[in-house]
Image: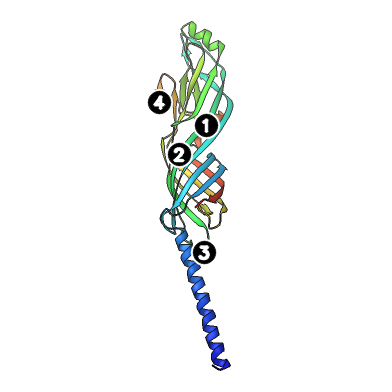
Amino acid sequence: MNMKTFGLVKSMVIGLMLLTGATAVSAQDDNLYGIANRVGVGVGVGTEGIGFDVAVPLTKYVQARVGLNIMPNININTSADVAGQAQGYNYEGQMDIKGKFSRTTFDVKFDCYPFANANSFFVTAGFSVGGDKLIEISGHSDDLQNLYAQGKQYNIEIGDYQIPVDENGNVNGGVKVKNFRPYLGLGFGRLIPKKRFGARFEIGAQFQGKPVVYADGVGDLQKVIDQDADDDISKFMDWLQVYPVLKLSIRGRIL
């Protein structure tokens, strides 16, 4: 074998080795995301609270996850106007009230990676399920308790609603949204990293429906006020129909 032939054979062997190696890497990459053949876990923080989830691949381009989000209590201290007129006595004043915002939600979501070979951009769709009581409202007034004993009952105004004050001068109620909340989002980062660890950023929205005010012992309340209220809870309710989601998480692959 002359040197020219030897060089040609050598080049062909090297080329074959490179092609075989590239094919093997591609096969490994494809096999990485077979149907439920890997498991990823994540922990994150954002506007849904502290989140934990478990994910599996369905294909190279689609991954599924189930998760739990816990929002710690957030207190809103504000005041509300007292409404109503009883036996010719018109009470003008306000009641200090507290709104407590907290929620625990369970998620089922599907992430699609349209450019899985090139980058980790994804779009996601799914739903969140949780308790319908989103904000708890409470307050007390000694004056209104004394007036109730005289047969004079009043309400407080929250947005377009009036919540009754009971015989103890207390107000107890809150704001409800839908139990089932569809979700759409997008971002960057793989649920199941190619390496052992990775990072992920997501932005999206939960569609909660129109918030409804309720009172303990009464149930859902009907709108009775046709005007814009300026208390903090009313302003908070204005954007509750579409709840924004921002989340940053750390991902890990355990299989």
Q: Say which quadrant the N terminus sits in.
A: bottom right
Along the polypeptide, which appears first: circle 1 or circle 3?
1
From the top left corner, tell me how far across and down residue 245 is, in percent. 52, 43
Q: Please state which amino acid type lies under the numbered disc 1.
A: Ser
Q: Position of residue 22 (x, y in %)?
A: 51, 71
- Name the quadrant containing residue 112: bottom left
Give the residue pinned by disc 1. 102
Tell me the distance, in whole angstroms, between the alpha carbons under discs 3 and 4. Answer: 53 Å
Colour style of the rendered protein structure: rainbow
- Contact flag, marks 3 and 2 (Cβ < 8 Å): no
| 166 up-or-down from 214: above or below | above
Q: CA distance from mark 3 to mark 2?
A: 31 Å
Can you say whether 10 is above or below 2 in the image? Answer: above
Q: Does residue 99 lie above or below 70 as drawn? A: above
- The numbered dot on residue 222 is 4
Give the residue at mark 3: 118
- Among the two numbered marks 4 and 1 on one chain, the one whose residue lies closer to the N terminus: 1
Q: Position of residue 23 (x, y in %)?
A: 48, 71
